[in-house]
Amino acid sequence: MSRDNAEKLRSNMTDAERRLWYRRRAHRFDGHKFKRQVPIGPYVVDLACLGRKLIIEVDGGQHADNANDKVRDDYLGDEGFAILRFWNNDVLQNTDGVLEMIHSALKTPSPGSLRAPPSPLRGEGKERE
């Protein structure tokens, strides 16, 4: 999806997405920066903390047992992202509980941060004679 589509989605957020965004924006959550409607590969995710590789999806009933979401989640997981999915009703009726789950996820290292560092360049680390 293009950046233009992401911009359109930003201006047409659901009530649940808007509520979470208000509580997440401007480093309001332990200093972690969240962005909304972020393009990642061919997808646009609802909210993302890129520094922690955490994606938050806020879904309506049309996403129940959706095979496309599975493909999307597999792609994003392969890119090193952890994904939290919440139903719109949960966000609207239990915002504090949803925020606590997000807070817990931010304390846990993301799959992407557990990857081994790149190998040193050839010759690096050798002592000079």
Image (cartoon, grey):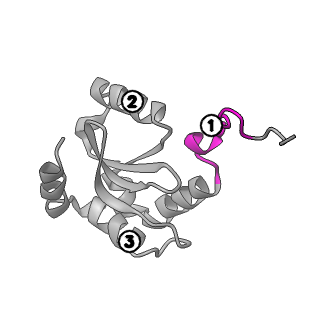
Secondary structure mostly seen in magenta is loop
Report whether 5 appears left or right of 23.
left
Mark with earlier residue (1, 3)? 3
Q: CA distance from mark 1 to mark 3?
A: 32 Å
Q: Position of residue 111 (x, y in %)?
A: 58, 39
Report whether 36 appears left or right of 54.
left
Q: Which numbered circle lies on residue 75?
A: 2
Which residue lies under the disc numbered 1?
Answer: 118
How packed mark 1 is, by other alpha carbons closer than 10 Å (few <14, some 14-19, many 20 or more), is few
Q: Which numbered circle lies on residue 25?
A: 3
- Three-letter code, disc 2: Tyr
Contact (Cβ within 8 Å) of mark 2 with mark 1: no
Image quadrant containing the N terminus: top left
> Element at badge 3?
loop
5, 94: nearer the viewer: 5
Q: Say which quarter of the image contains residue 100.
A: bottom right
Please state which of the two labelled residues, at mark 2 or mark 1, is closer to the viewer: 1
7, 85: nearer the viewer: 7
Q: Say which quarter of the image contains residue 21.
A: bottom left
Q: Position of residue 5 (x, y in %)?
A: 13, 49
